[in-house]
Image (tube, rainbow, N blue to C red):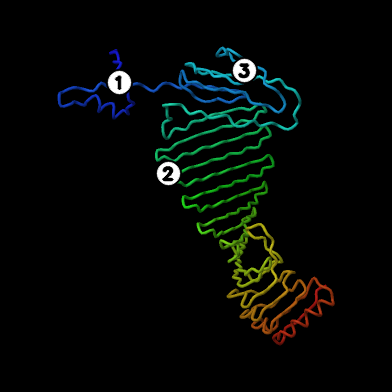
Amino acid sequence: LMPIPDNATIVTLSDKAFEAANNYKTEGGASLAAIKVEKADAYDLKIENGSGSGKYVEGYKVIVKAYDLSNGVFEKWESEDIEISDPTAKTFTIDMPGKDIKIKAVHKITKVDPVPYYPPEPDTHELEDEEHPKGEAVENVETKEDGTTVTTTTLEEEDGTTIKTVRTEKPDGTVKETEKTVSTDGTVVKKTVTENTNGVVKESVKTTNPDGSNVVTTKTENKEGVTVETEKATAVDGSVTVSRTTTDADGATASNTIELDADGNITSFTTEKTTSSGKKTEASYSVSGNNLKVTNIQSDTTTVKIPATVKGGDGKQYKVTTIGANALGDAKVKTVVLGKNIKTIEANAFNGQSKLKTITVNGKLKSVSKGAFNGINKNATIKISGVSKKDYKKNMKLLQKSGLPKGVTIVWEK
């Protein structure tokens, strides 16, 4: 080999740059001297009960440190691959040899700890002057003292997107996997999936956009096949949309969506139910504190049940207290069941419901406006249920004063 002069300038060249340098000629006909140096091999260093694990080139200086355990104290280092000058030193530095090596930190147990101890994740070390090829995943596996296995995988794709996955498997069968994706445009997606020994799987995803808006979704599925999904979307202006959907094993769904302005005021509240056969009922509400007023119902079914309470996407329980004007819209129903918290029925609440023959009131009414039942079937029956005889009479009086169509019957169901 030709020796390198003392005054030579050494630079790192890509393969294309190396080829170009060898072919370059100056005006005087002189050539550049280019030497191609192959990237050095990296070797595995595995540290048990300590930090420093990774892949390193020969000669790289690595700091190794023993973990602190809640039920024991560090005693010494052991290795069949290298000789450690001071095995009792808790922290030491090694020059990485040209081979794979294993080192174990031995602890003296001082007490029995009934609570499993999970030491911190190992330190990460980046190799100087060495990069992993894009599109090639790098994996690191660590087994902790209690048997927990942590697998960390890092991948940089050709377009610059990076994906880091951490999978933790505990001895009791619990598995947790977290994946974080950072795109070149600044979008960050963090996904976590946890599966416990009871068969419950929980998944959460948070997407943060470059403009500051974000969406957080969670999904939980139990062993019976029932899933609950929630989504919270925060816009740049601070407004928030929250939704919650429950899906039964037979495919029936129940969902609700709440929209809030930047000050936290609810601007929209809607619900939707779909039976396993595909029949759908949608309802819109206006909100006053924790009370809801039904403003519109659209349904494919002939029976509509207005609930006593509705659990919003924000997790709160809201009472349904009022039936608003034209609440049933264009729905063509035969039976309506009012929840026990309905206190007010506004004018024309059931306007245009000529097929409505049965209405059940499950509670004490406080106000029924004139013309509330205009348009219902002339032979309809209003059933009053779940109240005492005294309250039944009060309800009947309010209903009669509203101007019921002739032929409507009021009955008391004890």
Q: Is residue 327 above or below residue 279?
A: below
Quadrant placement of the N terminus: top left
Front in this rendered view, residue 91 or 397: 91
Q: Residue furthest bottom?
A: 406
Q: Amino acid at mark 3?
A: Ala
Label 3 vs 2, first from the N-terminus = 3
Rendering quarter of residue 265: bottom right
- Residue at (60% x, 13% y) in the render: 86
On the picture, is 106 further left or further right than 393?
left
Q: Secondary structure at mark 2?
A: loop
Q: Which residue is mark 1?
A: 35
Residue 287 at x, y percent in the picture:
64, 68
Front in this rendered view, residue 187 or 264: 264
Q: Which residue is mark 2?
A: 184
Quadrant placement of the C terminus: bottom right
Select label 3 or label 2 by which is in front: 3
Q: Is residue 226 above or below residue 401?
A: above
Q: Amino acid at mark 2?
A: Thr
Label 1 vs 2, first from the N-terminus = 1
Q: Amino acid at mark 1?
A: Ile
Residue 240 at x, y percent in the picture:
56, 59
**Mark seen at residue 89:** 3
